Amino acid sequence: MMTYDVIWKRLEGEGLEYCTVTLQPATVIQGKVICADTDRCFVEYEVKCDAEGGTEEVVVRYHEEQKLRTLRLERDHQDRWTVNGVVREELTGAKDIDIGVTPSTNVLPIRRLQLEIGQCAEVMAAWICFPEFKVQPLLQSYEKTGDNTYIYRSIDSGYTARLQVDANGVAMNYEDQWKAL
């Protein structure tokens, strides 16, 4: 089993994340995010993947203003998703989860795609956006620009960020957003 811990500091606003990443035999990511600025919140999550690296199951708990909300997502082998037990057709085809308050889930498409330097791939993710705490499809691209660097793009919004990753594809630097300590 290959497991290690990462602590990220939020660069835009006040916050930290403590995350445990297990990469073998199958990927499991568990994290706790604390936002201490105007969006005071606590988010805890667990992501479980299949042997091919696609997301299988996600549980996210969002504590905000003394309220607790929970999302449970599941993906079957035909890439159909349910959210809290309800089928969400618009997410069909997505293989990855993107939890909007953490850099941890970028490791999923980075490891699954296995891009060579200069290659780019578009993927659709099931995106959990915050503070709305809603799930929607998000078309993204990843371009490998160096041994440990990627350009992430949100196709719909035009947002772009440079990611510096470790040898396992885990983000160490997420441009202007997060930095590993």
Image (tube, helix red, strand yellow):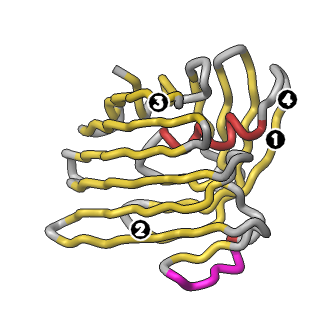
**Magenta-colored span:** 85-90
Query: In the figure, 50 relative to 117: above or below?
Result: below
Label located before the other in sequence (4 or 2): 4
Name the residue that disc number 1 marks.
Answer: 121
For marks 3 and 1, give the CA distance. Answer: 27 Å
- Asked if the residues shown at circle 4 and circle 1 are in contact, with their CB atoms under 8 angstroms apart, the answer is yes
- Asked if the residues shown at circle 2 and circle 3 are in contact, with their CB atoms under 8 angstroms apart, the answer is no
Picture coordinates of residue 113, whole percent (x, y) = 77, 38
- Asked if the residues shown at circle 3 and circle 1 are in contact, with their CB atoms under 8 angstroms apart, the answer is no
Find numbered disc 4 in the image and state the secondary structure of the residue it sits on: loop
Name the residue that disc number 4 marks.
Answer: 119
Label located before the other in sequence (1 or 2): 1
- Neighbours of disc 3 within 10 Å: few (<14), some (14-19), many (20+): few
Nearer the camera: disc 2 or disc 3: 3
Identify which amino acid the numbered label 3 is placed on: Thr
Q: Residue at x 43, y 27 (%)?
A: 4
Identify which amino acid the numbered label 2 is placed on: Phe
Label located before the other in sequence (4 or 3): 3
Nearer the camera: disc 3 or disc 1: 3
Taking 44 as reference, is 75 left or right?
A: right
Name the residue that disc number 3 marks.
Answer: 3
For marks 4 and 2, give the CA distance. Answer: 32 Å
For marks 2 and 3, give the CA distance. Answer: 28 Å
For marks 4 and 3, give the CA distance. Answer: 28 Å
Label located before the other in sequence (3 or 1): 3
Identify which amino acid the numbered label 4 is placed on: Gln
Name the residue that disc number 2 marks.
Answer: 133
